[in-house]
Amino acid sequence: MKLFKVIFLINLFTAIIPAQNELPTYYSQNFFGLTSPGAMKFGLLGYDNPAELNTLNQFDMQFFWSDEQGAENFNHWGIFVAVPHFGFGVVKEKYFETSVTDYKLSGSFGNSSFGLGIGYGWSSGNRSFFRHSNVFTLGFLIRPIPYISLGIVGNVPGEVQNEAIFDLALRPLGNETISIFGDYIVQKNLHPSVLNWSVGAAVELISGIRFTGRYYENEFFNVGAELSFGNLGISSQAKFDKEKDHRFNIYGIRVGAFDRNPFTGLFPDKNYVEVNLLGNIKYQQFRWFDNSNTLLDLIRQVDAAKADITVSGIAINISGMNINREMLWELREKLKEFKSTGKQVVIYLDRVDIDNYHFASIADKIVMDPQGTILLEGFLFGRTYFKGTLEKLGIGFTELRYFKYKSAAETFSEDKMTEADSVQWQEIINDFYTNAKDDICESRNISYEQYDSLVNSRVLFMPKDALDNGLVDAIGRWDEVKEMIKKIEGESKDFINPGSLTIFNLPEDNYWGEKPAIAIVYAIGVCDMDEGINARQLVKDVEAVTDDSNIKAVVFRVDSPGGDGLASDVVAEAIKKCGEKKPVIVSQGYVAGSGGYWLSMYADTIFSTPNTITGSIGVIGSWFYNKEFKEMLGVSTDFVKQGTNDDLGYGFTLPFIGLTLTDRDLTAVEKQKAEETIKITYKEFVGKVASGRNMDYEAVETIAQGRVWSGTDGLKNNLVDKLGGLSNAIDMAAELVDLKKYEYKLVEYPAPRLFDINQFMPKLFGIELEKSKLIEHLKFRLANNGIPMPIMPMENMDLIELK
């Protein structure tokens, strides 16, 4: 149906434009092309079909000339320049002392499967002699599958030469190895001398070496070749007449976009990839004004460096890095994979704690700043308790807790950890300690006894101490690392940016149409309908992913301490429906507990890491109310009502801060109703987990009661299926839908926001205004006062690196 619409549009376009003069015909516009527009690479960068510009991914420039009037005359040449979606071309033709110059400006939009382009061309010089006029071009490029490319071009106006061109190219192998093409012209009042069609083939048996042949209706034919050197390419084609006599040659030079080439790998192991981890490492960048690193980008950079034979190592600067413990584990595992190929990892550090040192210990060589320190302080989980604060402020608090380990409200109801909370968190901290200990001892060849001594007796290490104890390999500044690598490798190595790695710069012409996709859907932050995970929008994103036939599998990244059970459930149900159509793999981040686990439970497979906090299958409620706070401030409230419980939740709002505090505590009846609601919600939660995880209700109950688990223990008790990070989840998703051996792309949801408005906020008296995490947490709690919530403590909410 789409094809019929396109043909109708071309016919309508050529019919409604009034006839004027002749225009540069299709074959004159394609004169320098080795093939028809859609058959090889990017044609003439939009000059013959503007829709080609839709497939370009970098700046490119081509220069062609012919020797048809003698090599010394240089009478026929063309320059074509383009960036993605925009192109400009100039062609000059001279005959004795007269000449014409044709110009064309083109633009395009669309995607890899369907592109639309519009061009406008004009001429200068002796237009009447060459019979050239201005020309409008409407072009389409349709690639529904990797084996077919269909181009449709309409050129108007012209007194006798309004024309429509159809070109069809086929790839029997679905890649650039061989392309068979043909084109056909439909012209108004066709002149007998005008060419009507051509057929040919392009072959690329060796990357970057292409051979072409093209046969025309009048029995003329061309034979051509193109050789790429990466960012530079040369080409030549010979033109023969029907008697097979050679007539002239066309030569070309291309500069700009990186291309496949036969020289890649001939000079391997000369580069180190330079990675600077300064600043926040998060999940998604803003589209504008954001240079921060993301977890997915770093994973892809390490994978690309591992596969690139021109790379012999990675040099990483972790000074000023801000990243949570779980992401560090994922990146460390990727570097371990990188090292398995025999390539080197060098890490520079200055001031690090035990988490950052754990990450750095994977390096073959660790370089420490002369003024740096290493703090091996061990692991701790602690809380700040506000029970006494609330009492002093005259704020009442009622904890609606009915499950042993569900400690999310202890911050406000206790002045120290309860025994149950202490037990569950001690187990997690023990796992964190053991995990770091095992990795550091293995990587640095340190005994367990020596490690315990370093942590428990030494703690802080200056550069010389660190060197003497085998914690680092050299002392120096970041700008000295290159010289140190020279000593390690025995020769100088160039430092390159990750963006210059081959895989990120190759043209995408090896695959026609939209690549099959794996969607990464992020559920980051507190579970809320409009904040945090933003459940209303997230459900729409999941539904869009479910309905998109080009998305073959979904990786659902969960980093959430829970919150509103409604928000968790509506998203979980959308994930469940998605799983009925395509595989859904969950990758749990640092915190995927309570409502965060609710989000996870319907996946085909759940990945967690040893440093993930998961489980916390439980529900709790809390009730903040006024005791004397209002009166201390001199505030009073009054009301009229109709209904016994109509004043439930009524209170006053603190100006500026926006906290609303209710006037009274719950009555005995209201507390009983709250208890019933919380227990019913808990029972539903446990039942849903049992269904999603294919477990008995009783088996879930034994690991529930609000208890939190490390990812390591979560694997043992069947809360998760495998230990691994986002990369492992993507690999499994690709394997389940048989994409491992094919090219596919990753698409992320929700769509990244444009920019961070906070960076443009003014400072007040030179002081930057920041949101108080405590105030924000209290506002969230008060907004859900009395509501049953599958939520974790506020400390866990602070662990997540938010979007």
Image (cartoon, rainbow, N blue to C red):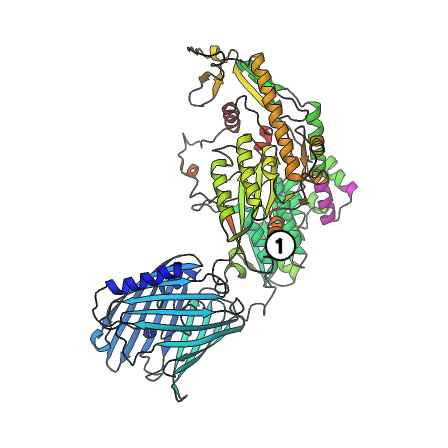
Quadrant assignment, res 17: bottom left
Indicate whether 23 appears above or below 503. below
The x, y position of residue 693, in whole percent, is: 66, 39
Q: Which amino acid does label 1 sit on?
A: Glu
Q: Mark 1 points at which residue?
A: 735
The x, y position of residue 640, in whole percent, is: 41, 10
Q: In the image, what residue occupies the spot 75% across and 46% down?
A: 446
The x, y position of residue 469, in whole percent, is: 73, 45
Helix, strand or loop under label 1: helix
Q: In the image, what residue occupies the spot 33% across and 78% down?
A: 195
Quadrant assignment, res 219: bottom left
Indicate whether 531 appears above or below 58. above
Quadrant that contains the N terminus: bottom left
Indicate whether 57 appears above or below 125. above
For this rendering, which residue is in front, 741 or 655?
741
For this rendering, which residue is in front, 482 or 601?
601
For this rendering, which residue is in front, 467 or 99?
99
The x, y position of residue 116, in whole percent, is: 37, 59
Q: Residues within 10 Å of mark 1 (few under 14, many from 20)?
A: few
The stretch of residues the image draws in magenta is 434-450
Residue 15, can we see it? yes
Q: In the image, what residue occupies the spot 44% across and 43% down?
A: 753
